[in-house]
Image (spheres, rainbow, N blue to C red):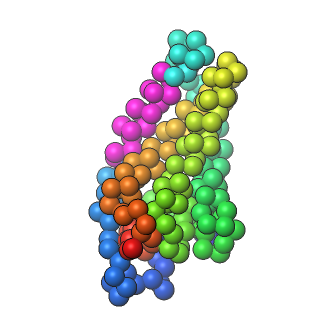
Amino acid sequence: MKFKLGPLPENDDFNPSEKGWRRLTEPSPILLHALAIPTAVVMLVLAFFFYTIFIGEDEFRIDITLVWWAIVILIPIHEFVHAISTPFWGMSDKTVVGFWPRKILPYAFYTDAWNRSRVIWFLLMPFVILSVLPATGMCFWKLDSPVLYHFILINAGLSSGDILQVPIFLFQVPRHAVVRNKGLKSYWRV
């Protein structure tokens, strides 16, 4: 695993035009962020809805201090979970975790080709590991933990951009295809 400060790797050794790769139709980063905001709101409302049903709390409690701590702590953990979802559990030098200050964008990135199902797994893992599983545990054991509650909610919001990308790979990339990126652009081939 490598760490990088700055833009996503461009993969200079990858030339999609020479090898028959097809580019995916993806929203621009600005549009993706714009779409992620209402998606995050929907996810937060759904998370609260399930919380009120299973825990029995009917009051929407938000502690701003906990929100800030959750954001600061969860962003690196969220990206680390992405990283360990890459081939070889992130232990490959092709896995890059970084932060692009100009775009205020933390990221985890894999520079080689990988199959479509692994990309989808990569996109969903932080949501599953950091929101779904803890929420299931809270519901099962009827835990009323404000700290865990805030972490689940914040991570659900942080996962909105990832979740928006899942249909792109499900509907544009054939089942047995491999995917590769050149910067922010994704390509596939069978």
Tell me if I can see residue 185 in this picture: yes
Residue 4 location (% of width, % of height): 60, 69
Q: Residue furthest front?
A: 176
Residue 88 location (% of width, % of height): 66, 67
- Number of disc labels: 0
Residue 30 location (% of width, % of height): 34, 54
Would residue 67 be found to the left or right of residue 162 on screen?
Answer: right
Foreground: 68 or 97?
A: 97
Tell me if I can see residue 146 in this picture: no
Above/below status of 38 relative to 88: above
Quarter-of-image position of residue 61: top right
Q: Specify the segment rendered in magenta.
A: 34-49
Q: Residue at x 43, y 66 (%)?
A: 176
Q: Residue at x 57, y 17 (%)?
A: 54
Q: Residue at x 57, y 13 (%)?
A: 57
Question: Is 43 in the magenta?
Answer: yes
Residue 60 location (% of width, % of height): 52, 18
